[in-house]
Image: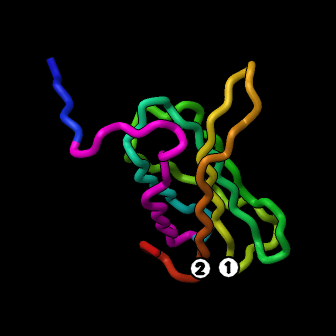
Amino acid sequence: MEIKFFDEVPKPRQEVRIKQLGLYMYEDQRRVQVGFVITPFSERPSLEVSIRNPWGEEVSSLHVIESLDTNFSLTMHLRDKVPSDTYEVIATLYYATPETEREDVHTVTRPLDATRAGEQ
């Protein structure tokens, strides 16, 4: 049996935030690991992540529906036809159900330098 103890009290949806958005660029310059640290929550939040090139075109996206964890990472693939040296990563934490309209709670934007492999 596993008992989990929290350092922080789970927060209501209005107080849930993306505490950290970590980026790790792979050497192939076509994949980026996106790491999240989220405030402990009482209701499971969803996340939408979009990576855009300098022209504003979306080159990668992902959705996490009702996350169970407060700390996790996923790998995204950059799918633009003409690779760029710089990108913008936009992560939005939100709540939604089939019966309710989407409620965006927190958004974080970070630059991504595709020419620099490793943690950013």
Image position of 55 (left or right of 43)? right
In the rendered structure, does residue 21 fall within the stretch colored magenta? Answer: yes
Location of residue 31 with respect to 41 vertically, above or below: below
Residue 115: x and y in percent read: 58, 82
The colour scheme used here is rainbow
Q: Residue 86: which disc?
A: 1
Q: Image point 51% across, 57% down: which residue?
A: 34
Q: Amino acid at mark 1?
A: Thr
Of labels 1 and 2, earlier in sequence is 1
What is the quadrant of residue 68 in the picture? top left
Q: Which residues are magenta?
A: 7-28
The residue type indicated by label 2 comes to: Asp
Image position, residue 55 (x, y; %): 85, 74
Q: x, y percentage for residue 58?
A: 79, 60
Q: Which residue is mark 2?
A: 113
Q: Residues within 10 Å of mark 1 (few under 14, many from 20)?
A: some
Label 1 – label 2 distance at C-alpha: 5 Å
Q: Which secondary structure lies at badge 2?
A: strand
Q: Viewed as shown, does residue 40 lie left or right of 35?
A: left
